[in-house]
Amino acid sequence: MAIYNKQNSYLLLTTDQAQALDAEAIRLGVCGENLMESAGRAVATTVADYIGTPLEAGGAVIVLCGPGNNGGDGFVAARHLEEWGYPISLRCSVLPSALKGDAKKAASKWRGPVEVMSDAGFKEAAGIVDCLFGVGLNKPIEGELANIVDAVNNAETFVLAVDIPSGLSADTGLPMRPCIEAGATVTFNFKKVGHTIVPGRYLSGGNSNIVVSDIGVPDNALSAITSRESENIPDFWGTNFPFSGPQSHKYERGHMLVLGGKEPTLGASRLASLAGLRVGAGLVTLAAPSETYPVQASALMDVMVRRFDSAFGFIGIVNDPRIKAVLVGPGAGLGEKTVDLVKQVGAKNKHLVLDADALASLVNRVDVIHGLKSPEIVLTPHEGEFAKLFPSLDFKSDRLDAVREAAKSTETVVVLKGVSTVVAAPDGRVTIATNAPSWLSVGGTGDVLSGMICGLMTQGMPAFEAASAGVWLHGEAGMLAGRGLIASDLLDVIPRVLP
């Protein structure tokens, strides 16, 4: 099954952007009827790919059409499927005469019967095609159609959603109950934001079952929209990734500094330090308090370990002009001393990553971040830390808007970790990761991630792209390490997922 590989294929569209793109294509001379014809044929092709030939399918294909253009796509798909020999049961929520525009034209070409909407035969069908509502739906499905959605979900039959599962918000990935639970989705031109954020990603069928089809929108139609949302894939950040040249040396690849930890979390800073090396930092130094220096120095062979006895001593290490980026947080300890170190490091001309204990120490003290002078700063909270740092931002109701507002208000790059990790820049750009396995949820993996991000920034990668790349590489490493991983397993596989 081919996935459409359009230029800028990482772009994600909101509802408004998707509608504006279609409108611009029509303004540029593309016939709306032709767009619908291409969309419907793509739907039919995807159905055939999933259920097999008419003989293999072993039952009727039920096409559920709604009152708008999504329903028009269904009429086109039904026509092609019938021409290819599939038995079709087409059901429409309105009379064909009530359809408008291109949808009405599409319905006029359908020569078979148009049945009233019902759940008859759902369990016996070879497949159900959901063309009830597209991305424009902005309120819950009600009445008889709500009952139909429930019946579809209870049928245990393959369901293909068209553009987006009916009842799913294309902008937030949250269902407006009820919502179709699709086994696969075929969408057009680009994925929508709702296809990537959980639970929308799962309701759409999961990554490998979201098919993006080219329906003939010209590339120059993109000039009508400004998409700030991107799927976090290498196509987005790859041109910024630091690749070493044949004559490069360790100092050209940058020197990274990690604030060493305190008992009982000494391993956190070691994981972060080694992760920075694995993604290509030329040198990594772990600055350890005197009481833990012997342990850290004896545990690390590839990382330099330097002793400090006070905040003044740590800042003395930071002042080394060769150090490009500093990571504060993993195992750093909670309290005012950590806040003071953040302030002092933030006064230097060093890129800065704040994680774990640094973030926890800044709860109710976010104003401290505003005063930092670092060229670029990345915050890497998990959901619990984010809720405490930004209590007025409800990431559960709109994940993208919450992270975007946090980045804007702090003028930092914010990484909200989770099953749908979102990276947001102060200028409003966001990336959404879709590749992290569930088994990454184990202690220490966040320390590895912060180390990877800092390591990439150390090599000169811009903070937003570095954070996005770190998140993607982290997910790929988790997939490669497999179920049952522990955080240190990631260190061994990072080199195998580097671009």
Image (cartoon, helix red, strand yellow):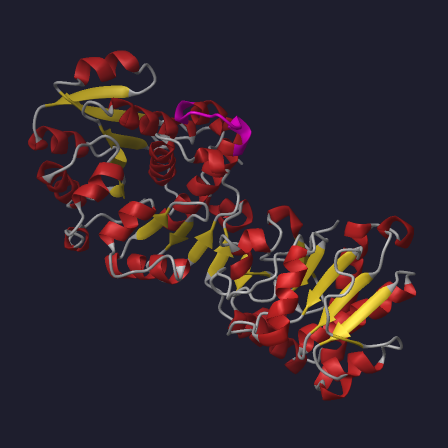
Identity of the residue drawn at 7% across and 28% down: 310
Please indicate whether residue 363 sits to the left or right of residue 464 in the image.
left
Q: In which quarter of the image is the C terminus?
A: top right
Residue 68 in the image: above or below residue 415: below
Q: Is 485 inside the magenta-drawn segment?
A: yes
> What number of labels is visible?
0
x, y percent for residue 276? 36, 30
Direction from residue 437 to residue 288 in the image, left or right = left
User: In terms of image quadrants, where is residue 65?
Assistant: bottom right
Q: Can residue 6 be seen in the rendering of this structure?
A: no
The x and y percentages for residue 378 are: 30, 46
**Quick check: 361 left or right of 216?**
left
Along the line of sight, which residue is nearer the eye, 345 or 383? 383
Residue extent of the magenta highlight: 479-488
Residue at image x 13%, y 30%? 314
Q: Which residue is drawn at 12% across and 18% down?
A: 291
Q: Give how far across and how far down residue 171 sits, in percent.
A: 49, 65
Q: Is residue 496 above or below residue 418?
A: above
**Magenta residue check for 408:** no
Q: Specify the quadrant of the image occupied by residue 251.
A: top left
Q: Is residue 351 visible?
A: yes
| Residue nearest the viewer, comparing 210 with 394 | 394
Q: Where is residue 426 in the image (x, y as percent from the top left)?
A: 32, 59
